[in-house]
Amino acid sequence: MDLLFKVFIDPFLQMGAMPDLLVQTLWEGLVSGVLYALIALGFVLIFKASGVFNFAQGIMVVFAGLTLVGLHEKGVPAWLAVLLTLGVMLALAVAVERVVLRPLVNQPDIILFMATFGLTYVLIGIGEFIFGGEPKQMITEELGLPRGAIDVAMLGGRVTFQKIDIAAAVIASIMIAALAVFFQYTRIGRALRAVADSHKAALSVGISLNQIWAIVWFAAGIVALITGIMWGARSDVSFALQTIALKALPVLILGGFTSIPGAIVGGLIIGIGEKLAEFYWGPLVGGGIENWIAYVIALGFLMVRPQGLFGDKIIERI
Amino acid sequence: MLRQLTLTALAAAGFASLAAPAVAQDTVYVPLLTYRTGPFAGSGIHIANGMRDYLEMLNQRDGGIGGAKIIIEECETGYDTKKGVECYESTKGKNPVLYNPYSTGITLQLIPKAAVDKVPILSMAYGLSASADGTNFPWVFNPPVTYWDGASVFIRHVLQAEGGNLKGKTIGLIHLDAPFGKEPIPVLEALAKEYGFNLKLYPVPAAQMQNQGSVWLSIRRDRVDWIYNQGWGAMNPTAVKEAVKNGFPIDKLVGVWWAGGDDDARAGEAGAKGYKTLNFHNTGAQFPVMQDILKHVFDKNLSQAKREQVGENLYNRGVYNSMLIAEAIRTAQRLTGKKAVNGADVRRGLEALNITEARLKEMGMEGFAAPVKVTCTDHNGHNKVFVSQWDGTKYVKASDWIEPLKNIVRPLIEEAAKEYVSKDAGWPKRTEACDAPA
């Protein structure tokens, strides 16, 4: 009886007793969720274009962040460093298309997936060789990102909004909207959707598969850079950051691997869900549940919608 | 013809030089299990540099230890237990004199192997606290303090700050959700009963090290008065940042000695001023030993560290660790009369380790650390610890040396050692003789 009370009643009593903490938890979840959505978007773009789950997305976040900070350490002004980093991510996209993807055209998806594993370790090696393994501080101030916090007295307590979190939420939202519009309404976006439907049909109408792949990998690189800046500003830029990117996995399970709205909604559900779960139900089992509860939430949704919230329902003729 | 003759003569000379009796130099092989890559590299690199540079300095300045050149070999573990065991297996055939696992997880895996392979383990201020019991763990050494001592010193520090009364106070342990992070829990639970404070645990899984938002919200909800941080790698700078962000009083966040990297505090920028960490050696490059490292290692471009990192907390930690290694080898040489000692000899050396004030001065370490004495029964020493505080640019000594609560810690250690041994029916009884202290 006591356990039932602790699971089903007490957390809600806590929410009512300390509503300021509930708002703070929801805000933390929202910021995390938007960032998860941004990471998930990087996966979705590549999956839509090539049917490949890009395991290297996490290290791309680290690589982009380290390149930016590394260039700035060499004396390159912050915004020029951003442009140069974008150039590096473009070069990486072209190189991946030429060296990894093009030779593997028509190979089973699992081969391409394994190739992204290889790419992950190559990027880790190159990153550590060039930048070393030490964590680096994001150049938040130099990029003009806001610092400090806004304390708001509300609901009998206080809620703190970090300015960098507000900026992260706003920038990530703009980025997501821009990418959604780009891929929904532009010629390249339509070409991407055609490639996603069928490589052969897209090729037959003159769409260059190689060009589309380079574009989506570059778009994923831009997403990686924004994520690296934002998450790097919240903690720091280190190789540990790549594990955060794997948080996109339950987001993708939930939202579907091919849906941009799915990545957004999935990210928010996972971000807010895991924070609420850790804060209100975590103490019942000694805490530390945030790491796996995201998968429980995703699996719960899968039981109702196996294709994910926004995933395409695959019907095959047999 | 002339050319042919010349070549023949050169070949003959070369052959003759190969055939001449070579004078084999005595050596001691010291494998260093380090991590310069992966999520924990931010802490591991500085320690690896300090360890390597001190041993390299001995090679350059003195030709090694007691006439034996030190063969230093690093093996990259990435702080991964599996890789650490692989490193051990791949190097144990090279006659290592001891192992530094540099991870509690790896240490726990190597403990049962030490007695079998006859190579001692030096887990300096980390590893299994219970292995301080030399009677049950003759091949494992963890001087100068255990995690349990550290937790007791933290509580003593809090007692002092709170006027000797902790009743009604809430003390939190934020810890890496791994064997290392969980180590201080038993002693903190015992101390919570003793002093009447409320203990709250906040585990941080490795994958969440840089995503601690909800943990710090829980700390805010629980109105925690003091936090002890048993973190490592990327967890520490994030914890400092989150403490600053959440308005937690930074001088009430105290890290174990491994949560005292300079980069950990720098991450919190101006708000981190006042962050505390336990320590058992000093910071700074003013000590003669550090000057020798700069002269004999850095000036010859033999270090992987940046010159300005000499004197930082974790670099000095690596130096301290290698000082223990070198002194154990030196003691083993004195006990056996051999230059090229082996693992069994160095086990005796570790057990007879007695680093006095006079010896610290000889080594250029006067004021750097406190004396250390290991005995056959006590493989730790439970030495004094002090509190360091971040002044905005570096750590400074912020307390006197504080004695651990030995009356509480030592019985717990002996009890835990007995329990560990009782779970393994085949655990060998100690047969190793006890040498007289050095």
Image (cartoon, coloured by chain):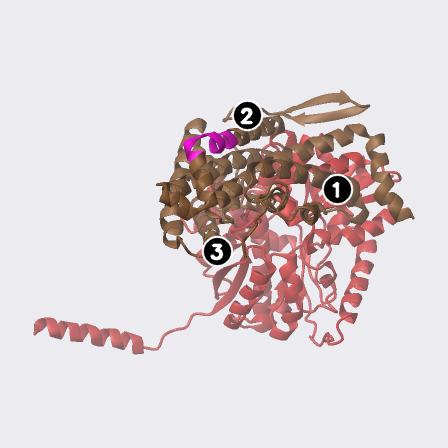
Mark 1 or mark 2, which has the lower sequence index?
Answer: 2
Other-residue count near label 1 (Cα within 10 Å), few / some / many at <14 / 14–19 / ≥20: some
Q: Is residue B349 above or below residue B304?
A: below
| Residue B104 image point, x, y percent | 65, 57
User: Which residue occupies 77% across, 44% down?
Assistant: A282
Q: Give the amino acid type for the residue marked by disc 3 in the picture.
A: Met
In this rendering, the count of numbered labels is 3
**Mark linked to residue A145:** 2
Q: Quadrant of residue A275?
A: top right
Dot 3 falls on a residue whose secondary structure is helix
Residue that extends furthest to the right in the rendered view of this protein: A1
Residue A137 shown left or right of residue A88 in the figure: right
The C terminus of chain A sits in image quarter: bottom right
Mark 1 or mark 3, which has the lower sequence index?
Answer: 3
Determine the colour of chain A.
brown
Q: Nearer the viewer, residue A49 or B196?
A: A49
Dot 3 corresponds to which residue? Answer: A114
| Residue A207 image point, x, y percent | 37, 40
Q: Is residue A261 above or below residue B316?
A: above
Other-residue count near label 2 (Cα within 10 Å), few / some / many at <14 / 14–19 / ≥20: some
C-alpha span from label 1 to label 3 = 34 Å
**Mark linked to residue A177:** none
Is any atom of residue B162 visible in this view? yes
Q: Quadrant of residue A169?
A: top right
Instruction: Tell me which secondary structure the magenta stretch mostly adopts.
Output: helix
Residue that extends furthest to the left in the rendered view of this protein: B1
Determine the colour of chain B.
red
Dot 2 falls on a residue whose secondary structure is loop
**Mark linked to residue A277:** 1
Magenta stretch: give its range: A179-189
Q: Give the amino acid type for the residue marked by disc 1 in the picture.
A: Ala
